[in-house]
Amino acid sequence: MFKKLRNNFLAVNCVTIAALIIACFGINYLMIYQGMRSSTERKLENEIKIAERRLGINAPPEADVPPEADVPPGADAPPEADVPPEADVPPDGEMHPGNKEAHNAPYKHDEREDFGKNQSFSPTFSIITDTDGNVSEISMAFYMAEDFYNDRAAQIIRSGKSGGRIHETDDDGSVSNWRYLLKEFDGGYIIAFTEVSSGIYMLQMLALCLLLIALAAVIVTVFISIFFANRSIRPIEEAYNKQKQFVADASHELKTPLSAINTNIDVLLSLDDVSDEERKWMMYIKEEARRMSKLTTDLLYLARSDYDAGNKIFSSVSWTDILKNSLLVMEARVYEKDVVLSSDIAEGVNVAADAEKLKQLVIILLDNAVKYTDAGGKIDVRLQKKTSEAYLTIRNTGAGISDEDLPHIFDRFYRSDKSRTYTETSGFGLGLAIAKAIAESFKGTIEAQSEPDKYTEFIVRLPSVR
């Protein structure tokens, strides 16, 4: 029991911590991913703005230039500053030769510095096309085939998407990832590109590192949780074992005086000079002593079953024969209560069990069914074998069990009558607890189903053997 409790504690603890670690790392990863994506979008927007300025689109208005100041005649003119020779710039509209047959359109260096201060080392460029997708200008050329610009521009324009990502496989097999942004203007399109392979690689390495850290944290948490769980449960286990030992010792010690009481009462009842009034009181004492003896026997069995759980070896017994013999024993009580008993018992059903304890299990369930079945009611007993399991079903009509009491009927000392008033059908609340202990000692299960004012059904499943 405590091993199962410890394992449940460890499972809940590890799942909770793992969920928190994954959530924290996931949030950090998403924040980094979103920051990189925003940075990429800004780079593309800046590249679009540079291209727009080159084309004269959305250019800022020219500042008003103040008129030249009047210079008095005869005044010496200021010396002219040395002006460097003009750079060899082709006329507007012509394509500037670039690297390896690619082309650069002329642009002012100060404009790119103004718009590209926040750009990283990732290659970023833009191309300008006409309405048909023909490339007319390239802001920067990289060592890529000229078909790259034409094919990618046509592909992007046909897709109709304003942004996205494309893959390019080089001759050496390496893959390049580019993110693009498309903007339309009168007379064509502007497409900005930026290389994001390094960012993708960094995100992949980040995800791998976070995963390894999370895995290591969970493993460390498991060992730490095992250590503290064992230390936390040990005092509870010791207290529970002492309680079981006390119950076993008390039950064993009570058997001797109860046996003496029963013996003395039997001697007194055998005397000839006992009056009827005295005999009545002696019978009360004998009945209560009998109930106390049964209680101590049940407590002693439960205490021993807790200690011996999982340490028993059973032989093959015939559940069919045990059930038939038990029904013969109960026939007199069934007849006295005017209850209809029907049975359907399969032949040759064998289980690995202790014959006496299996009979006790059957008697407890049959006795419970007879006890809580109203006069004229019905009890249905079935024993079946399916695959590797045997099923015993005992169903009786009557008041049934409420939904509130049903989950607790196998608890020790549990009774639906909270006042615990003694009646003819009342007990100590140990019968079904013993039945469950017996079923579990045989590696089986027992469960109950009920519908108030209609029926109650108990189902016992045990592993079958040949």
Image (tube, grey):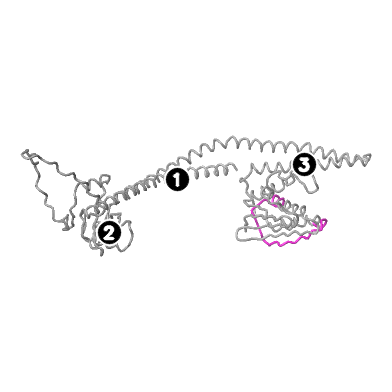
Residue 135 location, x and y as percent?
Answer: 22, 61
Is 72 left or right of 225, judged from the image as shown?
left
Q: Quadrant of the N terminus?
A: top right
Residue 301 image point, x, y percent: 70, 43
Question: Does residue 73 appear left or right of residue 250 in this picture?
Answer: left
Say left or right for 217 vs 356.
left
Give the magenta range.
Answer: 334-360
Residue 85 magenta: no
Nearest the eye: 318 or 74: 74
Where is residue 20? Give x, y as percent: 47, 43
Give yes or no for residue 350 being in the magenta stretch: yes
- The Cα–Cα distance between marks 1 and 2, rounded to whole angstroms, is 44 Å
- Measured in 3D between alpha carbons, the distance from the residue under mark 2 to the one under mark 3, in whole angstroms, is 100 Å
For label 2, count other residues whose C-alpha is less than 10 Å away and answer few (under 14), some (14-19) or many (20+): some
The residue lying at 23 percent from left, 63 percent from top is 134
Mark earlier in primary sequence (3, 1): 1
Q: Can you identify the residue that label 3 sits on?
A: 293
326 to 290, vertically: above or below: below
Residue that label 2 marks: 185
Q: How many marks?
A: 3
